[in-house]
Image: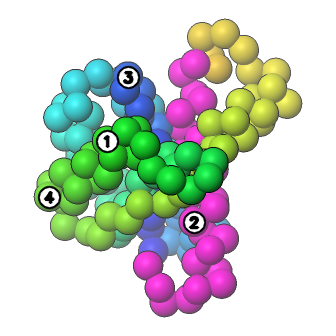
């Protein structure tokens, strides 16, 4: 199944996609959009253009598992996105993904403007990788 993941942000939204075999997650793009509704439209267009069969939206939980204002905004984003596309949309715990993405970019010595341009897409890849690992242990479940 081709699954797209979304790391929603106030100014940049990272998009990643896996292949049909669910083996490899790759960054697709970063949507540069500060307007909430436009970010939803552009994300929906990316899902359609890339023929996503499902979409995973990162859910930024607090470290204790509770939800704050940011998680509520991401839930609203996912709900409105699901109205624009005809494939299932699911929330997925994204705790520590930006930290992991920053660590990966440190290891590859990616700095400055290039780092800012790709960190959200890398975070989306990490979200998708986490979800794909879960799917391996839960075949047939979405």
Say how many tags the image has: 4
Residue ID at (47%, 85%): 141
- Earlier residue among tags 1 and 2: 1
Q: Find out whether the residues at labels 4 and 1 contact each other: C-beta distance under 8 Å.
A: no
Residue ID at (23%, 41%): 40
What residue is disc 4 on? Answer: 83
Main SS of the magenta part reads helix
- Earlier residue among tags 4 and 3: 3
What residue is disc 2 on? Answer: 131
- Earlier residue among tags 4 and 2: 4
Tell me residue 3's x, y (percent): 44, 64
Determine the secondary structure under disc 2.
helix
Q: Find out whether the residues at labels 4 and 3 contact each other: C-beta distance under 8 Å.
A: no
> Which residues, given as a range, are shown in magenta?
116-142
CA distance separating discs 2 and 3: 24 Å
Residue ID at (58%, 86%): 138
Residue 49 visible in image: no
Q: Is residue 141 above or below residue 90?
A: below
Residue 9 visible in image: yes
- Earlier residue among tags 1 and 3: 3
Q: Is residue 128 above or below residue 87?
A: above
Determine the secondary structure under disc 4.
helix
Q: Verify whether residue 117 appears in magenta.
A: yes
Tell me residue 135's x, y (percent): 58, 78
């Amino acid at each position: 199944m081709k699954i797209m993941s979304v790391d929603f942000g106030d100014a940049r939204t990272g998009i990643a996609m896996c292949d049909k075999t669910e083996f490899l997650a790759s960054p697709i793009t970063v949507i540069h959009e500060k307007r909430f509704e436009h970010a939803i439209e552009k994300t929906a267009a990316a899902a359609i253009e890339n023929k996503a069969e499902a979409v995973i939206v990162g859910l930024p939980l607090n470290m204790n598992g509770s939800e704050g204002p940011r998680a509520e905004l991401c839930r609203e984003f996912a709900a409105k996105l699901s109205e624009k596309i005809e494939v299932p949309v699911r929330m997925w715990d994204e705790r520590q993904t930006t930290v992991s993405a920053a660590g990966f970019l440190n290891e590859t010595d990616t700095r400055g403007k290039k780092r800012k341009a790709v960190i959200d897409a890398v975070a989306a890849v990490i979200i998708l990788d986490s979800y794909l690992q879960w799917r391996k242990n839960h075949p047939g479940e979405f």
